[in-house]
Amino acid sequence: GEDVEQSLFLSVREGDSSVINCTYTDSSSTYLYWYKQEPGAGLQLLTYIFSNMDMKQDQRLTVLLNKKDKHLSLRIADTQTGDSAIYFCAESRAGTALIFGKGTTLSVSS
Amino acid sequence: DTAVSQTPKYLVTQMGNDKSIKCEQNLGHDTMYWYKQDSKKFLKIMFSYNNKELIINETVPNRFSPKSPDKAHLNLHINSLELGDSAVYFCASSHPSGGPGEAGELFFGEGSRLTVL
């Protein structure tokens, strides 16, 4: 199948906003997800958005969904060094399990 | 009281050996999965079981055999290990999406790092 696309690296300074972008493939995906993976750990769900929503805000996290362009983004406000991790977007593709993008490594410098 | 637990966390073995990784979840979920994460951190679905029945089997060599003795357990057995099998293997579980408060999200274990020498 087609790939879920993400840029591989993002570098920001502490206190700045981070925006991680994702292009998914299945227009019938019911939910879209953002996961965070810290070094040596498993993936933790950060947030998800239902496909009939355009935006979801959860504290420092804002998810934007553009269904027409199949584009998903995650904005982290006031990025902290503890936010350094790999961020994966995922789509719920019909007939299979969640399909993940290749992950964006976020590096936060102080 | 870890939700999804895998053992062992690390496994180092020689080419040609057979090894198993075990997974247990105490979340009461119906569906369990195995994902493989390679050295570039790419995650790929391998298998999924729902109530002990295989429902997803991606293009995986038949040296890999999942076994689900009950819906809380999904084990992965690998025969004749090859260098390319070196990776981190993640177990996960989920409820189906659509129920109240259920978005079908996956809950992951901490991973089992397999190194084949």
Image (cartoon, coloured by chain):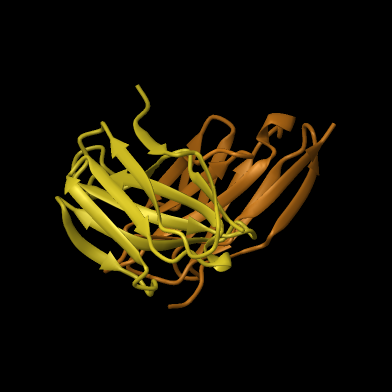
Chain colours: A orange, B yellow
Q: Quadrant of residue B57?
A: bottom left
Q: Residue at x 68, y 30 (%)?
A: A82
As drawn, the residue found furthest toward the right would be A110
Q: Could you say where residue A90 lies in the image, as x and y percent from the top left?
A: 46, 57
Reply above or below: B25 against A7. Answer: above
Q: Residue at x 70, y 44 (%)?
A: A18
Q: Nearer the viewer, residue B69 or A7?
A: B69
User: In the figure, is residue A31 to the left or right of B41?
Assistant: left
As drawn, the residue found furthest toward the bottom would be A1
Does residue B56 appear in this view? yes
Q: Nearer the viewer, residue A94 or B52?
A: B52
Q: Could you say where residue B61 lies in the image, as x and y percent from the top left?
A: 39, 73
Q: Nearer the viewer, residue A57 or B8?
A: B8
**Which quarter shows the C terminus of chain A?**
top right
User: In the figure, is residue A39 to the left or right of A97?
Assistant: right
Q: Could you say where residue B45 lies in the image, as x and y percent from the top left?
A: 40, 62
Q: Residue at x 31, y 45 (%)?
A: B93
Reply above or below: B13 against B45. Answer: above
Q: Residue at x 68, y 50 (%)?
A: A105
